[in-house]
Image: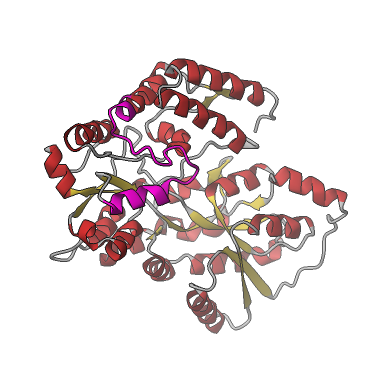
Amino acid sequence: MTIKRLLAAFACAGLLAPQAWAAEKIEFWTFSMKPKFTPYFNAVVARYEAQNPDVKIEWIDFPWDVIQTKLVTRIVAGTPPALVSLNVPWADEYARDGLLTPVDGLIAQARASYIPSALEDLRFKGHTYGFPMYSNVAVIAFNTDIFRQAGLTRGPASLDEQLAFARQIAQRTGKAGIAPALSKIDGLFMQQGLSVIANNRAVFNSPQHVALVQKLADTYKAGGLLKESLFAEDNFPAVIDAYKGGRLGMLLAPPTAMQRIRGDAKDIYAVTDVAPAPLGPTGIADGGWLVHFAIPKGVPARLLPSVGKFARFLTNDANQLDFARQASVFPTTVKAAADPFFLATPQNAGAAEKAVAAGALSMGHSRTLYVAGIDDYDELRRSLVKAVEAGVTGKQDVKQALDQAVAIWNKKLATLPRH
């Protein structure tokens, strides 16, 4: 259910009356952090309360698929939490609907401590809407045995090379070369500098878009793409299983995937090397997904300085570094991201250590790629994925398939409000 529909439902139910605010308490929400990170957050709260004895911090954690409904309920009731953990697409929608408070003034004294690309992720309508906490980025793991059989000696330096290497692997070894997440083709377009929407109209049937999808189709026909779950909403389980089974030459994944390979397939791990994922013409790294703390609408103005102080503490260098090390993600402050834990590669390092270092080098280029400002976007994205599947698998001419999807999008976009 979209935020607008939730708001309408709660309005009809008479839940819009404001209620009193307990000024002495700062309540902050996370999603899907318990029980693994309970000790971490309890320790953060204890340290802050010890330094600020006049403030009481309450931490509440919800499952990721529940937190949005809980948040809208509390916002429309007039009792929002002071801080809530969100991803960027959620924050974009909340900001568009006027349900978040800009934090420009509250983050000002700490702004220089955050990685600029992380702050840019949280800039909507000319304002900053959150305190960055952590993100991720993809690396390319490759099977050196398969590469050697295919006559390849290094990781790919561009998307074109990824596809060319995949075709060469298929030709010389009979194995698939790579398995892109084509259910996220919109993000791939954007990472390659190709707009999905311009001036409120779909534009992904341009000659450049057609050429990219045709390259995917050519690689698919040559056997270079792993066909299992290629267009599934989440193809990662099938992809990592194929890599662990020695059936896939390259794996585009977050660094944490190396730990799974090490635990499940020691023989494959032993022949795995790692390279940074190519940035593409945009200079944006693949796999970015920022999580941050936002301030919901309705938090009393008198409480905002205290909320801002706690948010800066929650996302400072030390706390981000501690959390990122425990969670195997990357921090979004400049100092924490440059810590030797991420950048130093020990002698005789394996793929897991190399992946962390490769990912850390890419973090300054990490952005959350998504199409902003479109209600019910998932419905449109599915029609795009269906068209790309038809073109890639040869069921339909690529240009014809994209033209049909563009027509579907533009019919829908013409009925939506402009943001």
Q: Nearer the viewer, residue 411 or 118?
A: 411
226 in magenta? yes
Check the picture and name the quadrant holding the C terminus.
Answer: top right
Q: Is residue 364 above or below residue 372?
A: below
Residue 114 in the image, given as x and y percentages of width and height: 42, 56
Residue 66 in the image, given as x and y percentages of width and height: 65, 58
In the rendered structure, the answer to whether residue 369 lies left or right of residue 372 reads left
Name the residue rendered at 56%, 41% in the picture: 126
Name the residue rendered at 63%, 78% in the picture: 55
Q: Is residue 95 above or below residue 14?
A: above
In the rendered structure, the answer to whether residue 109 lies left or right of residue 256 reads right
Name the residue rendered at 69%, 76% in the picture: 24
Question: Which span is picked out in magenta?
Answer: 218-245
Q: How many marks?
A: 0
Q: In the rendered image, is residue 338 in sight? A: no
Q: Nearer the viewer, residue 85 or 226?
A: 226
Residue 227: quadrant of the picture: top left
Q: In the rendered image, is residue 23 in sight? A: yes
Q: Nearer the viewer, residue 316 or 383?
A: 383
Q: Is residue 57 above or below residue 126?
A: below
265 in magenta? no
Here the colouring is: secondary structure
Residue 102 in the image, given as x and y percentages of width and height: 61, 51
Residue 117 in the image, given as x and y percentages of width and height: 41, 47
